[in-house]
Image (spheres, rainbow, N blue to C red):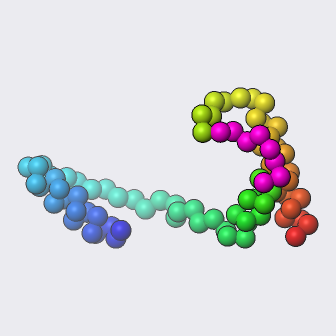
């Protein structure tokens, strides 16, 4: 959303509640946009690694090895293709 439009919306919402605002917006880093080819490579590599965590994830130091295998597999797939 354009910054001036955002400021207008915020000001109008505040005014509706009987308040005023002072907006100090500073643009940060641009959003992350994943490279489609690299994302496909990651998906292919991850498919070769078993035992990835499930929805009820709890930190488990043993998972580090799985992550390492996933990243190594990604590198191997990328270099092979």
Residue 21 placed where, x, y %?
19, 52
Judged left or right of residue 39, residue 73 is right
Residue 22 placed where, x, y %?
22, 54
In the displayed structure, would residue 69 be above or below residue 34?
A: above
Does the rendering let one see residue 71? no
**Along the viewing direction, whichever of 25 and 48 lies nearer the viewer:** 48
**Along the viewing direction, whichever of 66 and 16 lies nearer the viewer:** 66
Image quarter (top left, top right, bottom left or bottom right) of the N terminus? bottom left
| Residue ID at (82%, 37%) | 65
In the displayed structure, would residue 61 be above or below residue 38?
A: above
Residue 28 colored magenta?
no
Q: Main secondary structure of the magenta part?
A: loop
| Residue ID at (60%, 34%) | 56
Residue 63 placed where, x, y %?
76, 35
Image quarter (top left, top right, bottom left or bottom right) of the C terminus? bottom right
Q: Which residues are magenta?
A: 47-54
Q: Residue furthest left?
A: 18
Looking at the rendered structure, the number of numbered marks drawn on it comes to: 0
Q: Quadrant of residue 16?
A: bottom left
| Residue ID at (83%, 52%) | 48
């Amino acid at each position: 959303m354009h910054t001036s439009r955002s400021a207008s919306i915020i000001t109008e919402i505040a005014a509706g509640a009987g308040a005023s605002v002072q907006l100090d917006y500073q643009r940060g880093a641009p959003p992350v946009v994943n490279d489609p080819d690299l994302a496909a490579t990651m998906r292919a590599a991850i498919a070769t690694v078993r035992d990835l965590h499930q929805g009820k994830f709890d930190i488990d130091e043993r998972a580090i090895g799985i992550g390492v295998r996933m990243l190594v597999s990604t590198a191997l797939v990328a270099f092979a293709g």
